[in-house]
Image (tube, rainbow, N blue to C red):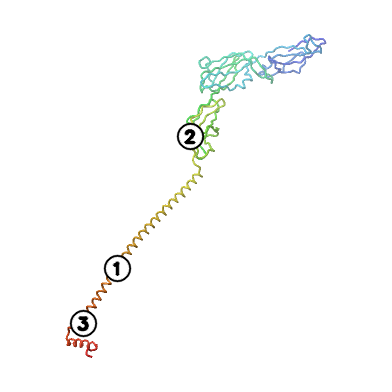
Amino acid sequence: MHTTLDANPPVSTCKWQQRSKYGEIIRDFSNNNQTLTLPTVHKDQRYQDTGEYVCSAENGIIGINGQLKQTGSAYVISTAPPVITADNKDSSTQYGKNGKSTKIFVNVYSIPKYTRISWYTHNTQLHVVSNKYATNDEPVIVKDVFHGVDVQLDGYRVTLTISNLQEADFTNYTLRLYYSSQYVLHEVTLQSSSPPETPSNFTISSSKETSITVQWIPGYDGGQTQTFYIEYRITGSSEWVPWEVKNSNQFDSYMVYTLTGFQDETSYELRMYAKNKFNQSQHTDIETIRTQKSDGQMSSNAIIGTVAGVLVVLLIVCAVIISILVFKKRKGTKKTKKNAGFYENSEFQNVQIRDEYEEVISKSDTEEKQTSKTYEALRPMEAVEVYDDLENDKGLPSSKS
């Protein structure tokens, strides 16, 4: 680039500068000659030479325009194939909602303009003239980097419209921009911005003294990583306590997780929901469970029950023994009285028998005495003598002597 300087006193040097169309300073050149030669750059970066080149000169005298420095400029356009501008970096992933329509776009700088647009997914070209897809482009101001400086440029926005989004539509889309017989590529990922679906089949599988185990089937994550939250509260209270699920176990389609730190022998209500970076699902239905008694309470109760049982058994045994003793005592008293009566009757009978014997003996003696006297009165003397002789034979004294 060359500039002609006309000054009095004359000036032979100037300062060169590159600016964007919208005034951003791109480069200052050290060459102070009237002729500027641009540095050689790679052909893929040659489009960054596009811009306004300004030469500033002064000779110490204020010009007719009231300025000390006088400038001259020219706008240079460097042709380039289509360029996917730097502002696409923040839109490499774009979003849509399930069941809705969405648009994905790509910003482009192209001089001259590209000649054709095509969209692909999984290496299959989309029919962009249909009820499902449509594409268009429009002029916009885009942002890119020229020689290390952020600048604004006149470019284009290429848009693909997708109707009635389904889960299969959340995938990668590739844009092809053709120039002559060549093309450039750019890929955009479409993700869902929908909230995750509510987990299904939320149930309580078991509980212990201080822990509760739940299980559920995860729903569609809305196209984003979802996190599960379980909320619990003591039955009758109003405040829910959230618990973020981490390191849950997967069994087939079910997920299983155990919460800890509960009170024993307490009734709890539980529910859950899923959440991604856009929104959260609805809550599940409430499930209710009562935690078990602690081992300490169970052991204490068992000991108390055992002691109580032993005491009851001992009381029963004592009662039986006392009853037996009372029964035996009463039976012995009755028998003693009966024997005493029997013995008393026997004594009376003995007395009677003794009296009878005494009466018989007395009567016998009386009769004997009476019989002796009777015989003595009746017998003759001779008989007496006979008896005397008989007695003598036995060595008894004779009645005569």
Q: What residue type is labelled 1?
A: Phe
Q: Residue furthest bottom?
A: 401
Residue sitting at x 27%, y 72%: 355
- Say which quarter of the image contains residue 113: top right
Q: Give the alpha-carbon distance from disc 3 to disc 2, as whole Å.
A: 128 Å
Query: Disc 3 designates what residue?
Result: 373
Question: Few, some or many C-alpha atoms within 10 Å of disc 1 (few <14, some 14-19, many ≥20)?
Answer: few
User: Which residue is at 63% across, 19% downward?
Assistant: 85
Q: How many marks?
A: 3
Give yes or no for contact between labels 1 and 3 (Cβ–Cβ under 8 Å).
no
Crowd class of label 2 (few under 14; some 14 to 19; many from 20; radius 10 Å): some
Secondary structure under badge 3? helix
Between 148 and 177, the one lying in front of the other is 148
| Mark 3 closeness class: few <14, some 14–19, many ≥20 residues within 10 Å | few
Residue 283 at x, y percent in the picture = 51, 28
Instruction: Give the amino acid type for the residue marked by disc 3 in the picture.
Output: Lys
Q: In this view, does 209 lie above or below 366?
A: above
Mark 2 vs mark 1, foreground winner is 1
The location of residue 115, given as percent across then percent down, is 59, 13
